[in-house]
Image (cartoon, rainbow, N blue to C red):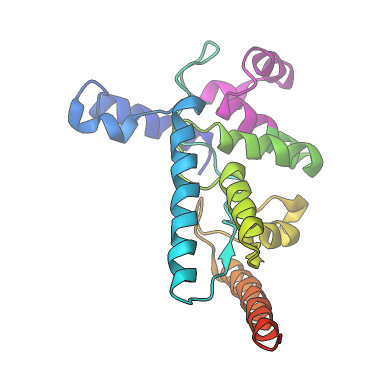
């Protein structure tokens, strides 16, 4: 999928499923960063409750970060733009024009994605990775995990002193420039066979660590 694909998909949505038609509002609804905050809080609350229920029943718990593909664009445009409606204009823009647009709106998911992808194509992973991560963080129609979700997972694992299967980190460690793409994913969030092998190895190590902890606790006088 490229920016042109997203452009066509967006036009399809708004042509055939107008937002003013109530039955299609959720299909095309876009969320501001402020509107997304309750979702993050609820995700953390749900994770805490799941761990609590498991521990109360003596179930061994291991949690893992969520890997996602960096090289597929955000799905829908933000509610506010800087003078364009579809990503074709971003894809065709010069580097200087992109920089000007970024100055006007540094939280525009498509601009962040375009800047990050261009940096990746130049082989500059240090610049590309944070730009792409921010693109998904500010995606107004989230359809994959993001850095905030993984930060919550890491914090919860630390608070409960349980092993973390850092799948996101392991996938990034083997990806070119640290930027996972089609070599590890079938689409925006589903790992291919190579990616799944990594996930299995990371979880196996975390489970073994957890079992060792429980064994040590059981042997403590």
- The quarter of the rendered structure image containing the C terminus is bottom right
* 135 lies left or right of 122: left
Seen at 71% across and 38% down, the residue is: 130
Magenta span covers which residues?
88-115
Using the image as rendered, state which of residue 101 and residue 51 is in the foreground.
51
In the rendered view, tell whether residue 90 sits above or below residue 148.
above
In the rendered view, tell whether residue 157 sits above or below residue 36.
below
Q: Is residue 94 magenta?
A: yes
From the top left corner, tell me how far across and down residue 198 is, in percent.
64, 70
Q: Is residue 5 magenta?
A: no
* 219 lies left or right of 59: right
Q: Is residue 30 visible?
A: yes
Seen at 49% across and 59% down, the residue is: 190
* 216 lies left or right of 55: right
Q: Is residue 181 visible?
A: no
From the top left corner, tell me how far across and down residue 45 is, in percent.
46, 48
Seen at 36% across and 27% down, the residue is: 11
The quarter of the picture where residue 35 lies is: top left
* 22 lies left or right of 136: left
């Amino acid at each position: 999928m490229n920016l042109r694909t997203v452009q066509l998909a967006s036009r399809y949505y708004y042509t055939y499923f107008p937002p003013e038609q109530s039955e299609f509002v959720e299909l095309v609804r876009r969320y501001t960063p402020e509107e997304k905050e309750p979702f993050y809080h609820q995700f953390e609350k749900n994770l805490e409750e799941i761990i609590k229920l498991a521990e109360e029943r003596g179930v061994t718990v291991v949690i893992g970060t969520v890997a996602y593909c960096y090289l597929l664009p955000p799905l829908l445009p933000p509610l506010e733009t800087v003078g364009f409606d579809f990503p074709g204009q971003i894809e065709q823009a010069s580097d200087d024009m992109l920089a000007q647009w970024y100055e006007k709106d540094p939280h525009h998911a498509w601009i962040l994605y375009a800047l990050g992808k261009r940096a990746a194509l130049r082989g500059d992973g240090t610049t590309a990775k944070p730009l792409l991560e921010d693109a998904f963080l500010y995606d107004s129609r989230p359809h994959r995990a993001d850095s905030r979700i993984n930060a919550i997972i890491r914090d919860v694992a630390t608070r409960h002193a349980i092993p973390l299967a850092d799948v996101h980190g392991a996938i990034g460690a083997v990806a070119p420039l640290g930027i996972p793409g089609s070599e590890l994913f079938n689409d925006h969030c589903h790992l291919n066979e190579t990616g799944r092998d990594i996930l299995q190895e990371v979880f196996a190590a975390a489970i073994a660590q957890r079992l060792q902890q429980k064994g040590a606790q059981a042997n403590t006088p």
